[in-house]
Image (cartoon, helix red, strand yellow):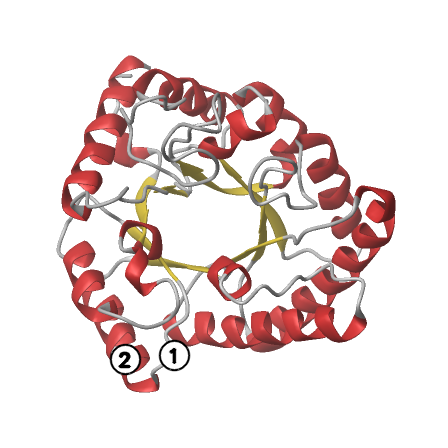
């Protein structure tokens, strides 16, 4: 690829994965966020809930000063609380919707251009009921987003039978869901994550091409899936080059190639493409971040 990467994408980092101690909305949020914002490799950052209003206000000031694009990941609001947006218990489902609406208001406050979440666990025997519940919940979120001025609601595609065991799920179901959402909502899209592709046993083409019309956001990362006894097995997002990992520069390049072919990566409106990488054990987050940047640079050079 002879053209600069930044012509085609805004490289981002998921704050709460690179620094998992802030995932529950507490911890050294401002210190770690500031470290990312000082790094001009990044044109975007993805943040999550910040429970302390004073911290939230200071974070908003940092984000504004840095002139960076912001996206909001509400996944921790569900994963750390056990709430399920497609819960067949109406009270449980509404609790999940409420906590996501709170996150949406926070996203607007922080200046986020998108709001992402994930579907919940399901029982295979009651899959269609869970699907209907997810559809209803997401329609409610999209209506709330329009009311509050949140630009876009995004569902991230996860694994369905390895780790998170989310309803959505493989590409055909993601396509069906996005098409159903499009019938009533024009502010909904899908997020595809490279690190989830081995978990759902899909190639970049299989994961992306069916949902190309609905794709609005993408992540790149790694996973370990071949042996459950290996360290970092499942949806743990270890660094590139991790022992037993599925993705490295070659796989990132293949993913980027498909995104270029469909016009997702483009020079008119470069999208956010974020690293979803997490330190394993006692690994230094700054080294894991440097690893990710090197890997993306190598992958771009392969195109």
Q: Residue at x 73, y 64 (%)?
A: 137
Q: Residues within 10 Å of mark 1 (few under 14, many from 20)?
A: few
Q: Nearer the viewer, residue 61 or 117?
A: 117
Q: Tell me where residue 220 sits by quadrant.
A: top left
Q: In this image, 192 relative to 276: left or right?
A: right
Residue 4 seen from this side: no
Viewer-nearest of labels 1 and 2?
Answer: 1
Quadrant the C terminus occupies: top left
Q: Residues within 10 Å of mark 2 (few under 14, many from 20)?
A: some
Q: Is residue 114 above or below residue 58?
A: above
Residue 200 seen from this side: yes
Q: Residue at x 27, y 58 (%)?
A: 68
Q: Circle 2 sits in a helix, a strand or a loop, which is it? A: helix
Find residue 55 and name its label.
Answer: 2
Q: Nearer the viewer, residue 197 or 64?
A: 197
Find residue 179 and name its label.
Answer: none
Q: Circle 1 sits in a helix, a strand or a loop, which is it? A: loop
Find residue 51 and name its label.
Answer: 1
Q: Residue at x 80, y 59 (%)?
A: 133
Disc 1 and disc 2 in contact, CB within 8 angstroms: yes
Determine the CA span between mark 1 and mark 2. Answer: 8 Å
Quadrant the N terminus occupies: top left
Q: Is residue 216 above or below residue 60?
A: above
Measuring from the top left, give residue 27's x and y in whole percent: 26, 70
Q: In this image, 278 relative to 141: left or right?
A: left
Measuring from the top left, give residue 130's x and y in whole percent: 80, 53
């Amino acid at each position: 690829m002879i053209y600069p990467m930044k012509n085609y994408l805004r490289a981002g980092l998921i704050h709460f994965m690179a620094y998992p101690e802030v995932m529950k909305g507490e911890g050294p949020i401002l210190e770690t966020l500031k470290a990312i914002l000082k790094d001009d490799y990044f044109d975007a950052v993805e943040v999550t809930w910040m429970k302390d209003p004073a911290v939230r206000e200071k974070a908003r000031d940092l984000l504004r000063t840095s002139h960076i694009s912001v996206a909001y990941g509400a996944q921790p609001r569900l994963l750390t609380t056990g709430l399920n947006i497609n819960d067949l218990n109406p009270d449980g489902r509404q609790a999940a919707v409420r906590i996501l609406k709170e996150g949406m208001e926070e996203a607007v406050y922080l200046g986020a251009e998108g709001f992402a979440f994930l579907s919940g666990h399901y029982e295979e025997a009651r899959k269609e009921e869970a699907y209907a519940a997810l559809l209803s919940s997401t329609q409610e979120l999209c209506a709330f987003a329009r009311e509050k001025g949140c630009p876009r609601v995004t569902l991230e595609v996860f694994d369905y039978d390895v780790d998170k065991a989310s309803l959505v799920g493989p590409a055909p179901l993601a396509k069906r869901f996005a098409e159903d959402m499009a019938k009533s909502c024009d502010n909904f899209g899908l997020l595809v994550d490279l690190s989830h592709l081995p978990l759902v046993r899909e190639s970049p083409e299989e994961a992306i091409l069916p949902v190309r019309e609905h794709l609005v956001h993408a992540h790149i990362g790694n996973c370990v899936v071949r042996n459950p006894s290996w360290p970092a097995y499942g949806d743990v997002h270890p660094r590139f080059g991790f022992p037993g990992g599925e993705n490295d520069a070659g796989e990132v390049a293949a993913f980027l190639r498909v995104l270029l072919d469909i016009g997702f990566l483009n020079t008119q409106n470069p999208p956010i493409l974020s690293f979803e990488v997490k330190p394993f054990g006692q690994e230094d987050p700054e080294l894991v971040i440097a690893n990710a940047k090197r890997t993306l640079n190598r992958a771009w050079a392969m195109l």
